[in-house]
Image (spheres, grey):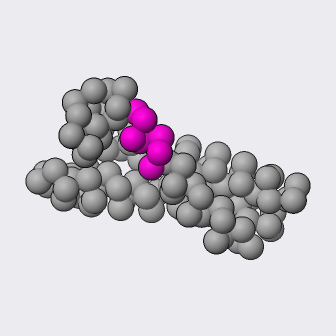
Amino acid sequence: MGMLPMIASMVGSTSAAVGFIVHLVISVLIGLALAVPGAGLLTGSLVRSAIIGVAYGALWWMLGSQLIMPAMMGMPVLAIDGASLMSLMGHIIYGLILGLVAALIIRRR
């Protein structure tokens, strides 16, 4: 969708590879922000953890791709189009997997 060079521009690059790495680092930090302090929330059922993860993914779609990044780049905020809806799906899938994996790891400890 052409978003990786845009993400890379946040650190002064235009490389899709740099954008991918920046996006992965942000994803890890956001994942830790749920799993570490929210460990108590994820100790219930897997369904509950999945719902929390989906909501968390949707929240970060709104914050990251609809508010923070466009504001940093001088673009319109809350611009909903086909690409942003695909991004929402990606964030929901990320949150679902995050919620389930974090819950399973927490259960093993």
Please count the marks in the image. Answer: 0
Percent x, y for residue 82? 29, 38
Q: Quadrant of the N terminus?
A: top left
Q: Is residue 43 above or below residue 72?
A: below
Q: Main secondary structure of the magenta part?
A: helix
Furthest residue to the right? 108
Query: Can residue 57 be seen in the rendering of this structure?
Result: yes
Quadrant showing the C terminus: bottom right
Splitting the image into 4 quarters, where does residue 53 fall?
bottom right
Name the foreground residue: 89 vs 31: 31
Where residue 88 appears, as percent x and y from the top left, is: 41, 47
Looking at the picture, how far across and down is residue 20, in whole percent? 40, 33
Report the span colored magenta.
20-26
Pick the residue in front: 39 or 10: 10
Q: For residue 24: magenta?
A: yes
Left or right: residue 46 compared with residue 81: right
Let me know if residue 50 appears in the view.
Answer: no
Is residue 107 shown left or right of residue 56? right
Residue at position x 41%, y 41% in the image: 23
Left or right, 92 with reference to 75: right
Residue 21's image quarter? top left
Residue 100 rendering spot, x and y as whole percentages: 72, 51
Residue lying at the far left in this picture: please name it: 74
Q: Residue at x 76, y 57 (%)?
A: 103
Q: Nearer the viewer, residue 13 or 78?
A: 13
* Outermost front residue: 12
Q: Does 96 sit above or below residue 12? A: below
8 relative to 2, above or below: below
